[in-house]
Image (cartoon, grey):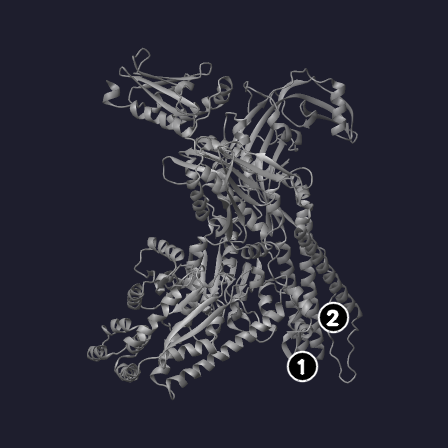
Amino acid sequence: MQIPRIAPEPRATADFFEDALTALGALCDRSWHDRLEVVAEGAAARLWREEPGLHTVTLRFAETAGGGAIDASSDVFPGCPLTFRLAEALRSEAIPCQRLVLAGDGRPAPDAAVAEKIWHAHIRGTTRWRLTKPFAAAHHFSLVASIRCEVQAIDQHWSLHRLALSLVDGAIDQSLAGELATLDHAADSGIEWPSVDAAHLQQLIQRSIEFELAEELAPIRARQQRFLTRELSRIDGYFHEYESELASRGGRSRAAGAQEKLKDRLRATKTEHARRREDQIARHELHIVPHVDALLIIAEPAWRATVNAVRDHREQQVPALFVPRARRWVLGGGSDTTTEPEGVR
Amino acid sequence: MADELLPGVGVHLKVEFDPKAAVVFFEWRGAGGKARVLASATIRYDKAAGLGYYCLSAVLEWRGKTTRDLLALDASSIRAGVMRWRKLLPCAPDGISIEGRPAVDPEPWLDLARRIYSFFKPLRRILDRMAPLPPPRSPSTPWKLVIVAHEVSNYVGFIWSGQDGALRAQLEARVTSPTELTWSYSRDGQRAERIRSQSPQSVHSELARWLREFPVANHDAKPIWYRFGEARGEVVAHPEEPFGPTEDVLAYAADLVGRFIAHLRLRLSKLGSPGFPLEGLFPEGRAAMAGPEYRWLRADERKRREREELELRVQQRAEERRARERAAAPPKRPSRESAPPAVPRVETKAAPVNHVGVKVALPALPLAEVAACDLEGWLLRERAALWWISNQSDDLLCLPQCRIQRLEYQVRTALRVLGALRGRALLSDEVGLGKTIEAGLVLKELFTRGLARRALILTVPSLVDQWREELFDKFGLAAVTTNDALFREDPSAFWRIPAVVVASLHTLKQPAQLAVAREAAWDALVVDEAHHLRDRNSQAWQAVNALPRQFMLLLTATPVQNSIEELYHLVTLLQPGQLPTPQEFRRRFIDPKRPREPREPAELRRLLGQVMIRNTRANAGLNLPPRRAETVIVDPEPAEAAFRDEWERALRETLGRLSASQASLWGRLLLQAAGSSPAAWRSALEKFPAADAARAWSSRAPLEASWQRKCAFIPPLARLEGGCVVFTQFRATQTALDAALRASRVPVVSINGSTPAAERHPLTERFRREGGALLLTRSGTEGRNLQFCHRLVNFDLPWNPMEIEQRIGRLHRLGQRNPVEIYNLVQRGTLQEHLLAILQEKLNLFELVVGETALILGERFSSDEFAEEILRRWRSPDGSVAESLAALGEDLAASRESYAEVQRLDETLFAQDFESS
């Protein structure tokens, strides 16, 4: 889920500064609609200076950078370094991977007929569906990541995405990403949390990020394609003309080694042509660098079942989880009250 | 007692919050559960305090005494109160418990102050509703003030009325030019205007003056904003919240004017981005801009669209024409006379379609598993990331870190290079527009965005150190140069330094250096004075072409000198293939009879537009008023002239007996000092190696008459409005002139190298206010901007034309509104008179723009060489000194003519097609 950028507005900026500085341990007071009095110490004070001790500052929030005199240590405006520093101060070297338990709806296991309909809606091509065992309470684990995506396409584009993935099958869960802030939490009642394998999470995110970015990449890709086509046509035209010139020059020469020389030069030209094309193709490549800022492992109530179904005339027994919140089936999962998801070792 | 012997050890503090009673309780005890109470305290809301608004009462009972402090309900006051108790009754951090839980924060007292503030802050509103307190009233004054922020008419107004409501005074601040504010005021039935600078200091002092005259209590000051309403043309008033007791009305007003300046400067400037500031000012959007007053904005947009469409059509037509030509080209037939050798066929198969690739590179995840769930904290981190990306502005990110004056054309240029031109450009601004600044901006932005980590700047040897200084002073980029010891000690390590490297082009050309330099992958390559690369066969061109580079900037004011083929070579360095093959280029664009005039100028301009930016003074808004130079010749007394001739002959002979370097040094010094003043001349003679001769000259010199005449010229100029600036090379001249002018009752301000830096600005301001004469030496000139004055006197003439240009540049710069009058004082029949004649008539020095002198002289002399050449011609003249210098003048005239020709060619070729807008 892409989170749209915030329009630079002094009040919203001041709200963010107040919350973020308070989280860093500073004392803040909104003395005016566009002013924030800050008394900072420790991590918060390091935004302004390296030495320990208290730092007092009155922040002023402006709508634009403008052309007047700016004090970059106290004026907050779009693009100002202080906002970058504050946002970076809230990050840490290691990415904290937190755990959250979502509360269930307290309803009993779904009716088998309903579960079967949902199965057929999601998983096509199966017949003779039946549960081999009744539903058993379990948990489904998901990964939610907050990712700043840097797209390098000659110039830079940045966007923020909240990516929610099932740890079982790696599928993107848009509803979980969208509803995260509004879902009810529950206490951790002895859930056996899976240990987290960073390499595997990285693989999962890497696999999903291009899909997540597809919509955003479309116009950038089209523009790059246009640029690339133009550049390649320019290069091709140039070498075509050059080769024609060489050929006609060779055609006029009667010297003994002229033809050999001409062939050599044409060969070198072809190599150079290919190199220039490759260079342009590489220059126009889109580079996506995802920067993960925060991770959350979510456990939510689910129903574990083993489903018997026929696919391609072959009967199969598939362990699966039914997630009531999303009303969807997740193939895979463990056999006990907790799942053994794919992304977990 | 433990607390007295060892402060803090064994003392426990318990803090409880009681929301119902709105009290915070503190209790200090000794160690152990049943230890006695050492002290107790409370902080409560105290509306009875009566001393201010939102008062908290902090009561401490300790050692049988009760002390009471009043705290304002703000963070700093509470923190100060709590910290006072921390000092009085220290206790170890692990001895503090808040609400029954041990304090976990590493700074528990600070945490405590924060909690107390958070505890009382919401209470403030509740308690206010229950028993509203009257706001504190600062002492009343007879005035009331309404501050009007008028977004529709674009001004900030201040209206003072008496307590009876009668209007007393009115002040309005309007932005009337990019650098000035017009303050209109009416008071006592009179209306007047004054023009002031837009600097925050000026705004602050202007408002402070008015508020001193009409002071107002905070509760008597009211801000009102006027904005566009929903309906077209409707103006709606939005009264702001009243001023709080701690608010500073002056600061608010100064801030408000500053914000208007920031918006309107962009809006009024046609060069700025027109939509942005208006939208910023009027969030209601473009609907408000449908009115006739925004006709110019709509016209600009229409023109832009039309230009884009035209470019597209031209491009399409050219493509079609080329395709037709290719299709119609007859196959080459073998000649009948000659038996044709077999020609290898050129394959013309369609090029494969290449799709843009996508690479995802997710860095490794350094995970830290955290058991505790803190969704709020998680969401805050995500919010921080959102602000981080939202803060990526469309403007240059690096600007707040640069110490430069923001000039819109320079910012536009940098944005265009980074955007549309994709980091490769030929910057060919006219001289004096700041190509170095533009290149510095591009570099700094590349570094800020993380797009570059290594950069190489190539320039001529004399500018290497200047580049390093400018990069550091203006952009905070530290650079290593080929003048550093490292380069001499270990050249291979030097070229591999992952930073900014400034090198001389001449050094790079050396095969050994080039071999190492080409091994490094340069993210950015900047070539200053790129006209040295106009010849493809030159070593310099070959060397630069061999360097691997991602982004590249070529800087030159004169990309074409002899033939437009030179331009071809520059563009080929930037974008190989942007122009056709050399043969095709010659065939299509160059007329062999007129190599400086392109055959298809429109097509050439189109192709160049994709790699070239050329700002002109006209598009940059830097059309300065003209300069007018006047030579004032002082006639010497006959005895004086005779002595001077005799002295010059003797000096020639004496110099002949000195070593070459000494002769050069003393010859230049004495001749220049003699042209300045008797005091400077005598002062220089004191250290002259031929002491006997010096004493003899000094005792006989009848130089006072012409000195008096020169001095008499200054007072009438100094008494004119705005006064005059007098430049001299010698401190002794400055001191003598200072005394002479004071004797004539002229207000004088003198600044020289010994004037402390802190005093220079106030002295300049005094001259600006009071007028009179400002006497400056070379070192006193540095960093002084004197555009408020338009009269300049060259009391003596440096032998370095660049120095004269720098003197003029102090006054003739951005912000100068009047034609600059330059008076050159020289004595008849002296070397100075002849020198001035050639500088004025042959070089046309006083009418050139800043930077042109260097370009003209650069062809023949470095600055020191020019002075040396003058001395050489004076010492051994071919005929008279005047004739000898006249020959030098002819050389200068030829250089100038050649420069003028190049300039004309550039103007013809490039016209207005490559501006950054």
Residue A345: tell me if it is visible: no
Picture residue at 71% right of the left edge, 73% below the top: A247
Q: Quadrant of the C terminus of chain B?
A: bottom right
Q: Which mark is residue B345?
A: 2
Chain containing mark 1: A
Q: Are marks 1 and 2 on the same chain?
A: no
**Is residue B525 positioned above or below A219 on the image?**
below
SS class of the residue under badge 2? loop
Coordinates of residue B641 in the picture (x, y in percent)? 31, 82
Q: Amino acid at mark 2?
A: Arg
Residue A232: tell me if it is visible: yes
* Residue denoted by label 1: A255
**Which class describes the residues within 10 Å of circle 1: few (<14), some (14-19), or many (20+)?**
few
What count of labels does the image hold? 2
Gap in angstroms between the C-alphas marked 1 and 2: 19 Å
Q: Nearer the viewer, residue A149 or B404?
A: B404
Q: Nearer the viewer, residue B166 or B810?
A: B166
Judge from the rendering whether residue A318 lies leftward or rightward of residue B628; answer left or right. right
Coordinates of residue B907 in the picture (x, y in percent)? 60, 70
**Is residue B73 positioned above or below B362 on the image?**
above
Q: Quadrant of the N terminus of chain B?
A: top left
